[in-house]
Amino acid sequence: MSLLHSVHSLPATGRNPMRDMALTDPAGVRIGAVNYLNSKPLIEGLTAELATVAPQAELFLDYPSRLADDLSRGHLDVALIPSVECLRDPGYEIVTDACVAAHGPVLSVKLYSRVPVEDIGSLALDEGSRTSATLARLLLSERFGVRPELDLLPLGRSIATSNADAVLLIGDRAMHPVEADFVETWDLGEVWSDWTGLPFVFALWATRRGTPLGRVEEALTTARDRGLTRLSEIGAREAGALGIAPSTAVNYLTRNLHFRLGPSERQGLALFRRLSIAQGLIAGEIEMAFRDCGIPG
């Protein structure tokens, strides 16, 4: 039986018997991962690994913002969530050093503006975004003193349908040429790294404090390590379904992204936290929490 399901097969509200099972039986852990190319290396061979070390575990694929909501509601036990959620919720722990990060252009997080950036008065945010939405607001405010009115660009809606001065796109669709005219385009990973000299961490594996995961933590790290040895293979395999050139997909995974949370990534997260607090984008009293799982300091 496949371990891949839609996350929305889980109940949206009310008591969740699967949650009760997961708390008493770590093998029944429900895992949420992002269904974007940037996350494929983190789940490479994960279903096979789980079949061995946690055969009752299940893997659900969805958008980052939905995974964050489902983890918060108790519908998932561990999930690859936007990094900003680990700065907003004191109940989360980071459980592995596997992550999605970039030190330079990220290619899949872009802000498109119809006006000069300093004149942006309205900003439509990709509904799937949380961290990138916060980063866009932070960069606009810190760099240009711009605090635009915010709107949502619904999932599946074309960028051309938005009347906002600027639009934030994330994920696979941000890797395609846009069908509207814009005078400026920002790659947020590039803007951040040029400004700070640090990498930016977009997503992390997190759980609620005290949630038993058994050997799932080990499986997540093993899957990432396996993925790192297959980046070119993954890019070539996934390119066709995404409608992008294999060389673009391979370069994206091998050059634009990296997948290990090291000291410089933690420095980038800490700076993002401090600046976001200063701009009132997150609360100041919450510190990132790391489960004792070998994450480097």
Image (spheres, rainbow, N blue to C red):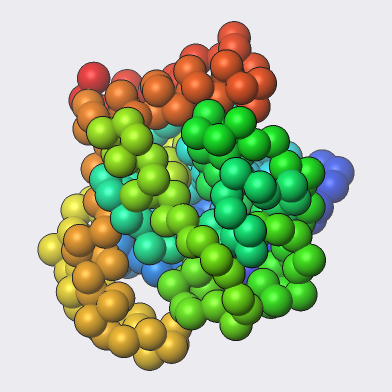
Percent across and percent down for residue 130 are 61, 45
Percent across and percent down for residue 2 are 48, 74
Residue at the left extreme of this rendering: 229
In this view, the residue in front, 124 or 182, is 182
Residue 1 visible in image: no
Q: Looking at the image, which residue is at 71% across and 58% down?
A: 165
Percent across and percent down for residue 186 are 46, 56
Quadrant the C terminus occupies: top left
Q: Looking at the image, which residue is at 35% across and 56% down?
A: 106
Vertical relation: 55 (above or below) 174 = above
Residue at the top extreme of this rendering: 285
In this view, the residue in front, 5 or 105, is 105
Q: Looking at the image, which residue is at 44% across and 45% down?
A: 203
* Side of 80 where 292 appears, left or right: left
Percent across and percent down for residue 213 are 44, 37
- Residue 97: name its quadrant: top left
Residue at the right extreme of this rendering: 14
| Circle count | 0
- Residue 89: name its quadrant: top right
* Side of 151 where 262 appears, left or right: left
Residue 122 visible in image: yes
Vertical relation: 146 (above or below) 128 = above
Q: Looking at the image, which residue is at 62% across and 78% down?
A: 180
Vertical relation: 227 (above or below) 233 = above
In this view, the residue in front, 9 or 126, is 126
